[in-house]
Image (tube, helix red, strand yellow):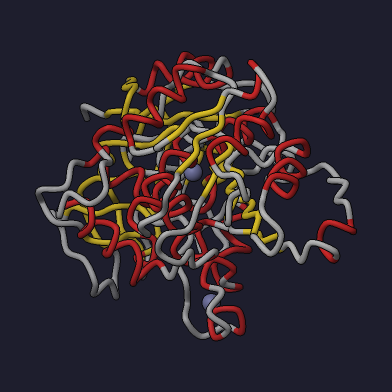
Amino acid sequence: MKTRAAIVPEINKLSIETIELAPPQAGEVLVRIRAAGVCHSDLHMYRGELTTPPPPIVLGHEGAGFVESIGPNVTGVKVGDAVMINWLPACTSCVNCLNGLYTLCQNFIRTAYAGTLPNGSSRLKNSAGDTLKHYLGVATMSDYIVVAEANVLPIPADVPFEVAAIIGCAVATGVGAVINTAQVPTGSSVAVIGCGGIGLSIIQGCLLAGCYPIVAIDVVDNKLDFAQQIGATHTINPATGSLNRALRKIIPNRPDYVFDAVGAATTITQALKIVRPGGAAVIVGLHAAQEQVPIPAGSLVFENKRLLGSLAGSINPRIDLPKLVDLYRAGRLQLDKLITNRYTLDELPTAFEAMENGKIAARGIIMFDN
Ligand SMILES: [Zn+2]
Ligand SMILES: [Zn+2]
């Protein structure tokens, strides 16, 4: 069948084209996408900033929609079900899954990073007949997608598709970093560096964990205002004065946990610097994934500090994603507020531009009217 999709034909090029989508094979489903999140990872892929598979590739890894048809041997979903896309499922039987490292599942992560479906093949071709990759094994920025059954999770009918789309990546990553990776005890003091979609999700995770104070740190004032609306108790703009001094006024003994949602070399070292002795700096963002970060070894040993990495919130997808959906439905996660900018598929270049210029207060979403 034909589908319109956002393609990166080569690094720094973007086009919205009608392409050919082959039907689902055994264990696969065809999903009619209703909403797709615009994540920094998609931007990184387009800009060639991460170790990603070489283009051509169809973008998108956050999404939700309806199951349109199913291939043979699909048992968990049926035609018409509302589903969210989970780009990183867990097999539960590889050595990493057995060690509880579900987001490092060896059976899914390799093909996801290679841009194929879990069986190693692609269902996508452009009009010239060239094979296209599926970004992170799902490629959600398309009217229709074919993914493995493991990549879809049924959602209740009352969850808006735009909300379901961000639960699978931004929200899982942010809330999971607090609850799963850091396992923050109730009452902990925290600081969050970077207040985009991930940072705001971290703040919501800190609210769930009963943290106080929750200090939001960002160089964009609008983002700080927004962080306060979401639940940050204090804000600091380090561009307007000393971060250390401002932080000590709020938390004299320095935060128990510092979350870095940016992941730049500067913010990673900053997170480690501003956390209290014995505290943990939790690195969630991906900005400097290809850079070396200088770490003062003394601060780790003499101050007993911990440096924790968190991939996709260290979640167990089958347990944690439905839990996040339930928390949203119960009003414990304010996810509607996180969706601040809506675009059509054709407006993706505008969405990326807004993202690069810090103009998206929280999260941008592509809405489909297919
Ligand atoms: Zn993402
Ligand atoms: Zn596994």
Toward which corner of the image does residue 243 lie, by quadrant?
Answer: top right
Residue at the spot 69% in from the left edge and 45% down from the top edge:
274
Q: Quadrant for residue 242, please give it.
A: top right
Question: Is there any visible trace of residue 68 in the rendered image?
Answer: no
Q: Give the residue at x 54% y 65%.
A: 181
Q: Quadrant of the N terminus?
A: top left
Q: Residue 297's quadrant in the figure?
A: bottom right
Q: Nearer the viewer, residue 196 or 242?
A: 242
Can you give x and y, in whole percent of width and height, for residue 99 in the image?
Answer: 58, 83
In the rendered image, the quadrant that contains the C terminus is: top left
- Nearer to me, 269 or 247: 247
Answer yes or no: is residue 60 visible.
yes
Q: Position of residue 141 (x, y in %)?
A: 41, 35
Going 32% across and 44% down the picture, which residue do you hit?
A: 165
In the depicted structure, whether residue 221 falls above or below residue 307: above
Q: How many marks?
A: 0
